């Protein structure tokens, strides 16, 4: 029998979040609430030096005076920050030398996610620093990396082992007071990844981190710092999945990238936090601050595939400080049901001959709202700055929305800024055409969406691109209208 | 192979086909001709199972099975192919990727595993050569920016790849110059054999000089008003459609 639109809708509604499960692991969780004492306790628990504790406290004091931003095109109930527990770590204290020592429950979780560490270990070329509930549990391939002088470890470890590097760069791209969530993160960040590539070194493998939120009611405050020293290159992958929860969970990460002269950083993200159910109940609030600074002749490229979260608020940006530096932003944002996404980028041209490219693909289905918000700023000294922006929206059905908010500020008349935008709908004629060739409707949608997103998918490292394509398929199953 | 029995089809309540009867056997080529608005494309859409068209009455039997209730992809799996009058664009999906997905979907529906990549590649090369298609063409986005001729050639390329039992060529000649027409017709003729059948839907007799029909049917106001051999096409060309009205 024919697959009607009604059936499609039904199937979409009954489709459960694929990674919705909870692992029973003994966890060490702080009681709820935030105060100077809690900040101190987090710092102490992590055995941090005094300067770090003070750094956090200063962030906390700034945060207390700040208000949550309201300018974005999203509606949600503001989190009660005293109802959140700010630290949760699997209880096992020691780092593991081998996987045999890892909690079997945790390993099962990885298997369900299809990222079993066993497999990952064999997959030469991918080193994984897995963050489950804030504490790094297993780190692989570190030896290979350390031979080249590459540091890839948890941020907690970096604070202890490489205090000079951390001290110099943390908060240098995103100051603590930058915004409400960066201040909060700076005060309470639990863990995250740290990466340093020495001068002239090309990182021989893709570095990747998988994040998950696991503990009920635990906010996640990841902190990532990537430093590419002069003439170095690194490709960093970040993938996220989270188990299903009824109450909203807050995720307020901060990612800072530093590309020194002639360096290149490629940062790719697949974000699949729990989006909430079909009625818009539950789901993760994803309020992330990501920013990179480019020194002379350097390049930072952000690629993101955002399919999850109930509310996303995220603008990976580039400060093109050095002459001839390049910033790129490639994004696919998918929203379905009641998801809301307000995402985009900021390209700040400061140096001469700086170039930026923005390719944004928004896909909206169900009753979701998808906004692109981007700023291209050309400062007075930025002679010959170039920007090209392309924002395409694909709509499914007639209950969703796509919005574009491009901001352009040009203060140098040698600048060349281009902006292209398009909006399209998946047509019944396209579906029928595929059907007639024996391709069912689900697969047809996947095909059309993949085609639409191609320019961005092509920028992802191979293994990530495959995962991302699957994710697009899962996120949009049965959402034609 | 195909038996259409008293088929009535309407679009949004408006009757388009008013009792079509047609019998197509394996190895035959049938031409359906008629003036604009006579229901030619509706007939092809109804056979392919386009859900925008309501079958009010009648049956369509394919290989002895009533397919009226089947979804378009299920009909495709059984071996029905429609060459579209206006092929649809799918940006970002290459011709190769599309045909690969199509072939593997059909294999899967028949409980078979995916075609191995080397076999697929070999077949693509062979069929592309048959239709004089350049390999660069295969890595372009499906129908995006294609000329009319390229679109039609691509339809017949897909037909060649899928090897359907029944092919319906809906106005395949429109938009083709004489050279392209010859290439397409030549391709179709090479694909023709004793176990498959072709329905050629056309306004003009031109294409029928190259794809010789066994039967010609004239459609007028949703009914087949006249049937005959290939000479009927010539008669129509000379006398025009007013003659049969």
Image: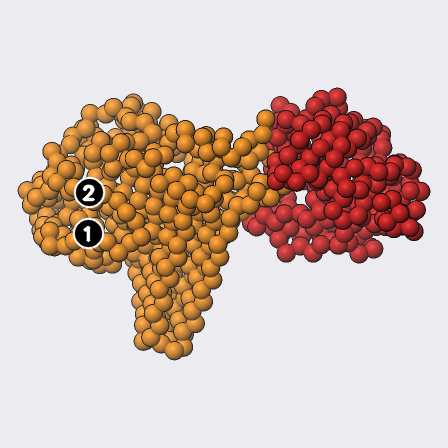
Chain colours: A orange, B red
Cβ–Cβ under 8 Å for marks 1 and 2: no
Q: Which residue is mark 1?
A: A68
The residue closer to the viewer here, B200 or A354, is B200
Q: Which residue corresponds to the image point at 47% horizontal and 43% vertical from the top-left?
A: A397
Quarter of the N terminus of chain B within the rendering: top right
Residue A443's place in the image compared with A379, above or below, is above
Q: Is residue A131 above or below residue A180?
A: above
Q: CA distance from mark 1 to mark 2?
A: 10 Å
Above or below, comparing residue A480 to residue A374 in the picture: above
Which numbered marker is on residue B188?
none
**Left or right of A257: which side holds A49?**
left
Q: Secondary structure at mark 2?
A: loop
- Kindly identify which residue carries mark 2: A79
Please tell me which residue is depicted at 77% across the width and 42% down the height of the picture. B221
Q: Position of residue A98 (x, y in %)?
A: 30, 28
Instruction: Choose between B69 and A435: the one closer to the eye.
Output: B69
Residue at position x 89%, y 47% in the image = B243
* Relative horizontal placement of residue A166, taking residue B31 as reference (left or right): left
Crowd around label 1: few <14 · some 14–19 · many ≥20 (10 Å)? few
Disc 1: host chain: A
Determine if residue A100 is in view. yes
Number of marks in the rendered image: 2
Farthest left residue in view:
A37
Judge left or right: residue A82 versus residue A303.
left
Q: Earlier in the sequence, mark 1 or mark 2?
A: 1
């Amino acid at each position: 029998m024919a697959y009607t639109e009604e059936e499609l809708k039904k199937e979409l509604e009954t489709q459960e979040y694929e990674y919705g499960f909870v692992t029973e692991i003994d966890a060490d969780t702080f009681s709820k609430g935030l105060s100077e004492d809690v900040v101190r306790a987090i710092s102490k628990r992590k055995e941090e030096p005094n300067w770090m504790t003070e750094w956090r406290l200063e962030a906390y004091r700034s945060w207390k005076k700040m208000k949550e931003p309201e300018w974005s095109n999203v509606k949600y109930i503001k989190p009660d920050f005293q109802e959140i527990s700010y630290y949760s770590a699997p209880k096992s204290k020691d780092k593991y030398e081998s996987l045999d020592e890892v909690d079997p429950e945790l390993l099962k979780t990885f298997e369900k996610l299809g990222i079993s560490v066993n497999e990952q270990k064999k997959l030469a070329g991918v080193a994984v620093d897995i963050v489950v509930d804030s504490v790094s549990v297993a780190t692989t391939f570190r030896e290979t990396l350390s031979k080249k002088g590459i540091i890839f470890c948890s941020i907690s470890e970096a604070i202890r082992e490489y205090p000079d590097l951390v001290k110099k760069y943390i908060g240098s791209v995103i100051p603590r007071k930058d915004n409400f969530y960066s201040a909060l993160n700076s005060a309470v960040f639990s863990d995250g990844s740290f990466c340093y590539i020495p001068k002239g070194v090309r990182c021989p493998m893709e570095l990747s981190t998988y994040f998950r939120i696991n503990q009920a009611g635990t906010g996640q405050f990841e902190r990532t710092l990537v430093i590419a020293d002069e003439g170095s290159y690194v490709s960093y992958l970040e993938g996220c999945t989270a188990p299903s929860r009824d109450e909203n969970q807050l995720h307020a990460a901060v990612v800072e990238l530093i590309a020194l002269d002639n360096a290149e950083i490629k940062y790719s993200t697949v974000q699949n936090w729990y989006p909430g159910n079909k009625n818009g109940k539950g789901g993760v609030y994803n309020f992330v601050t990501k920013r990179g600074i480019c020194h002379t002749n350097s390049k930072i490229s952000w690629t993101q595939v955002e399919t999850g979260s109930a509310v996303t608020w995220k603008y990976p940006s580039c400060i093109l400080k050095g002459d001839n530096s390049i910033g790129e932003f490639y994004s696919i944002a998918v929203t379905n049901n009641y998801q809301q996404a307000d995402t985009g980028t900021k390209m700040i041209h400061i140096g001469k001959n700086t170039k930026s490219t923005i390719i944004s693909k928004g896909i909206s289905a169900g009753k979701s709202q998808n906004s692109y918000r981007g700023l291209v700023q050309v400062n007075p000294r930025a002679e010959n700055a170039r920007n090209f922006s392309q924002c395409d929206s694909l709509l499914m059905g007639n209950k969703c929305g796509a919005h574009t908010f491009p901001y352009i500020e040009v203060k140098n008349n040698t600048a060349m800024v281009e902006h292209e935008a398009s909006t399209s709908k998946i047509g019944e004629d396209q579906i029928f055409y595929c059907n007639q060739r024996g391709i069912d409707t689900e697969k047809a949608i996947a095909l059309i969406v993949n085609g639409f997103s191609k320019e961005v998918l092509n920028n992802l490292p191979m293994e990530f691109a495959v995962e991302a394509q699957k994710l697009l398929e899962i996120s949009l199953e049965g959402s034609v209208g | 192979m195909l038996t259409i029995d008293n088929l009535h089809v309407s679009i949004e309540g408006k009757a388009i086909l008013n009792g079509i009867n047609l019998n197509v056997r394996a190895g035959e080529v049938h031409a359906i001709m008629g003036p604009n608005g006579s229901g030619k494309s509706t007939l092809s859409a109804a056979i392919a199972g386009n859900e925008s068209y309501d079958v009010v009455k009648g049956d369509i039997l394919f290989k002895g099975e009533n397919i009226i209730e089947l979804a378009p992809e299920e009909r495709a799996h059984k071996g029905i192919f429609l060459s579209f009058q206006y092929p649809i664009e799918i940006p970002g999906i290459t011709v190769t990727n599309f045909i690969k997905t199509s072939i593997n979907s059909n294999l899967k529906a028949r409980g078979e595993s995916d075609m191995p990549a080397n076999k697929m590649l070999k077949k693509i090369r062979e069929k592309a050569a048959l239709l004089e298609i350049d390999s660069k063409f295969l890595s372009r986005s499906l129908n995006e920016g294609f000329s009319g001729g390229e679109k039609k050639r691509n339809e017949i390329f897909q037909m060649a790849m899928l090897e359907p039992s029944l092919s319906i060529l809906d106005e395949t000649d429109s938009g083709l110059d004489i050279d392209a027409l010859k290439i397409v017709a030549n391709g179709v003729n090479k694909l023709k054999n004793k176990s498959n059948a072709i329905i050629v839907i056309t306004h003009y007799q031109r294409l029928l000089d190259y794809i010789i029909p066994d039967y010609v049917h004239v459609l007028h106001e949703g009914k087949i008003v006249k049937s005959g051999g290939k000479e009927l096409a010539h008669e129509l060309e000379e006398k025009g459609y007013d003659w049969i009205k």
